Amino acid sequence: MRPSLVISAVVAALVGFGGTLALIVAAAQAVGASPEQTSSGVVGLCLSMALTTLYLSVRYRMPIITAWSTPGAALIAASHGLTVGTATGAYLLVGVLIVLTAAVKPLGTLVQRIPVSIAAAMLAGVLFRFATAVFTSAQADPALVLPLVVLFLIARRVSPFGAVLVVLGVGVVLAFALGRVGPLPSEIPLPSIALIVPSFDPQVLIGVGLPLYLVTMASQNLPGFAVLQAAGYKPPVTSILATTGIASLITAPLGSLTSNLAAITASLCTGPDTHPDPDKRWMTGPFYALSYLVLAIGGASMVVLIAALPAGLVATFAGLALLGPLVNALGTALHDVTRRFPAVLTLAVTASGVSLAGIGSAFWGLAAGLLALAIEHAWRK
C-alpha cells in the first residue's frame, strides 16, 4: 500500500466531479429539472461511479475507473425542447443500447465501423457552442469572466487537470465579491432521491438518444479502453459495457445521465505514478469509490451553490472545462486528410443547432457527414 494509490484516486474523483458538475447542472436546467431532481441525478451518478468502479476494479484486479458522460451532458445541455421525462427516456435508450452492444457482437462492430473522424466532428460541433459561450459571457460580464479566462490559461500550464478546479474555486469567491450570487438556502440541503417517469418521444429518442449513445461510445468508452490498453492491461470489454449499461438503466429514473468508462481521469490511476507495479494499481478503485460515496453526500450542497451562481459564470466553467475535449475532438476529426471535408460538414451542421422534423442537429450532422463520405467513396469507385 502506497499513499500514491489514495492520492491518485481522490484527485481523479475530485477532477471528474468538480471539473464537470457545472455542466451536469446546466444539462439538468436545460431539460427543466427541479433542484430536487437535479440533486437526485447527481446522487445517482455518484453512487453509480462508486459501485461500478468498486465491482470492476476488484473483480478484474485492474484500475477500471468509471465516470459520467461529459460529452453527453454537453449534448443534453445544448438540446432544445426536452423535458425531464423525455430526457429520462433518452437515458434509458442509451442504457439499453450499451447493454445490447455488450451482448450482440455485430452491434459493437457496427459502432466501431463509424469513422472516428465523423464521430469526433459530431462531438466537436456539440462542444463548439460551449466554447463560444465563454466569450459571449465575457462580453456581458467582463469583470467576472475575463479574469477567470486569464487564470485558466496560466493554471493549465501547471496542471491541465487542476485548472478547472482552480477556476471553479476562484470563480465562486469572485462571484460573491461582486455580488452576483443569488439567494442561498438557510440550511444545508441533504441528498435527495426523486423518481422520474420516463416519456418516450420518437423524435427525442432519434435526435438525442441515438447521438448520446454514439458520443458516449466514441468519446468515452473507446478512449477508455485505449487508456487501459496503453497501460498494459487487457480490459474486459463485454463486462465493462454490461456493467455500465445496467447501471445507466438503474439510475436513469433518478434523472442521472449515462455511466461509462472514464478516459481522461482514468489516466490518473493507470500510470506508474500511481504504483510501480501494474498488478497493484487496481487498489485505486476502492478509494475512488469511497471518494464518490462522500461526494454523493455533499453533492446536494454543490448543486444548490452552482444553481445560485450567475448563468455567465456557469457557462464559463462549462466552456473552459470542455476546451480540452474540443481540441482533442478537432484534432481527431481533421487528422485524416481524405475524410476532412465530410468531417467539417458534420461539425458545421452539428454546431448550427438546426432542428428538422423535431430531431436535433447532432443527428443531422452525423447523417450529413456519413452521406458526404458515402458519395465520395462511391465517386472514387
Image (tube, helix red, strand yellow):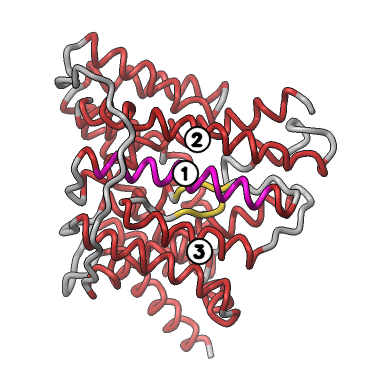
Q: Position of residue 154 (x, y in %)?
A: 48, 19
Density class for disc 1 (Cα within 10 Å; few <14, some 14-19, many ≥20) is: many
Q: CA gap, disc 2 to disc 1?
A: 6 Å
Membership of 125 in magenta stretch:
no
Q: For the residues marked 1 and 3, what is the alpha-carbon distance in whole angstroms? A: 33 Å
Residue at (64%, 57%) from the top-left corner? 225
The residue positioned 53% from the left and 73% from the top of the image is 101
Mark 3 — residue?
117
The quadrant of the picture occupied by the N terminus is: top right
In terms of secondary structure, where does tag 3 sit? helix
Q: Amino acid at mark 2?
A: Leu
Rendered view: 364 above or below 130: below
Q: Secondary structure at mark 2?
A: helix
Let me know if residue 349 appears in the view. no
Residue 77 visible within the image: yes
Q: Which residue is mark 2?
A: 293
Q: Position of residue 258 (x, y in %)?
A: 42, 55
Residue located 52% across and 86% down the image: 380
Please rate how many residues cluster around mark 2, counting C-alpha atoms within 10 Å: few if below 14, some from 14 to 19, many from 20.
Answer: some
The quarter of the displayed image where residue 350 is located: bottom left
Crowding around mark 3 (Cα neighbors within 10 Å: few <14, some 14 to 19, many 20+) is many
Answer whether labels 2 and 1 touch (C-beta < 8 Å): yes
Element carrying mark 1: helix
- Which of the two discs, 1 and 3, sits closer to the camera? 1
Give the CA distance from mark 2 to mark 3. Answer: 37 Å
Residues in magenta, as a range:
37-57
Q: Earlier in the sequence, mark 2 or mark 3?
A: 3
Residue type pointed to by label 1: Leu
Above or below residue 167? Residue 70 is below
Mark closest to the chain's N terminus, 2 or 1: 1
What amino acid does circle 3 point to?
Answer: Ser
Left or right: residue 196 versus residue 148 is left
